[in-house]
Amino acid sequence: MIADTIHQIETELAGRAQLIAVTKTKPVELLREAYDAGCRKFGENKVQEMTEKQPQLPADVKWHLIGHLQTNKVKYIAPFVALIHSVDSLKLLQEINKQAAKNNRTIDCLLQIYIADEETKFGLSAQEAETLLNDPTLESLENVRIVGLMGLATNTDNDDQIRREFRGLKQLYDTLAALNRKNVQFSELSMGMSGDYHIAVEEGSTLVRVGSAIFGSRN
Ligand SMILES: *Cc1c(COP(=O)(O)O)cnc(C)c1O
């Protein structure tokens, strides 16, 4: 079942974007099933859940933190996290840099951009993202690399609106990718979930974060 869905999504993506299986709230047996079907990228939104599951899966799994990250929790994921999708402040980036250095690693990060027409606390505006990328402090953060942007479209049935939001994020991506900044090297645009990944891929996504379409709805 899970394997069939994963293979179907991979076929649809046709190499244009990579699949991140979003496994939050799901038991490790289901993650193993996805692993056996070929999945190597798993997305979790909570630090504690990710650190509990990580030792129970093979070491070649790439763990993607897709939810809000508090500075005091960075240390728990710094030894192994592959990509942090939810960087929304310079302060958080500084802490990631510090913990990455302690682990002799460079941690790849995405800036989370607020694109939805909804009330939410998380994500930077276009202006805030540009300001962050131009902050001179960034040059001293040798153990982080900003590799792109992440965004969540509005939760709506209006496909035109979703497409507009993704297109806007892609435009911002292209603009910011052209900035020539140390420790910034854009290659990933994380957009699209179960309900809208088809549109996201058409609009230039390189990483889709798909949960319920693979594992069923969450309670
Ligand atoms: C839960 C979550 C997803 C996956 O959502 P589905 O609709 O289940 O595919 C993607 N991105 C983020 C940031 C999430 O928190």
Image (cartoon, rainbow, N blue to C red):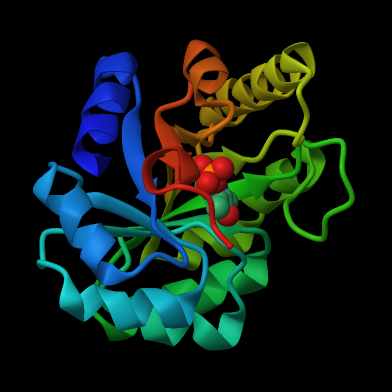
**Residue shown at the point (54%, 57%) measured from the top left:** 218
Residue 154, position as x, y percentages in the image: 76, 34
The quarter of the rendered structure image containing the C terminus is bottom right
**Residue shown at the point (52%, 29%) measured from the top left:** 177
Q: Is residue 71 above or below residue 186?
A: below
From the viewer's perspective, tell me whether residue 3 is left or right of residue 66: left
Residue 2, position as x, y percentages in the image: 26, 42
Q: Is residue 117 above or below residue 171?
A: below
Q: Is residue 135 above or below residue 92?
A: above
**Residue shown at the point (11%, 59%) measured from the top left:** 60
From the viewer's perspective, tell me whether residue 73 is left or right of residue 31: right
Residue 75, position as x, y percentages in the image: 42, 86
Residue 101 visible from this viewpoint: no
Q: Is residue 108 above or below residue 102?
A: above
Residue 180 visible from this viewpoint: yes
Residue lying furthest front: 1
- Is residue 79 or residue 130 the one in the foreground? 79
The quarter of the rendered structure image containing the N terminus is top left
- Is residue 145 or residue 48 the one in the foreground? 48
- Is residue 207 or residue 140 the one in the foreground? 207
Residue 108, position as x, y percentages in the image: 37, 55
* Image quarter of residue 72: bottom right
**Residue shown at the point (75%, 43%) measured from the top left:** 114
From the viewer's perspective, tell me whether residue 73 is left or right of residue 159: left
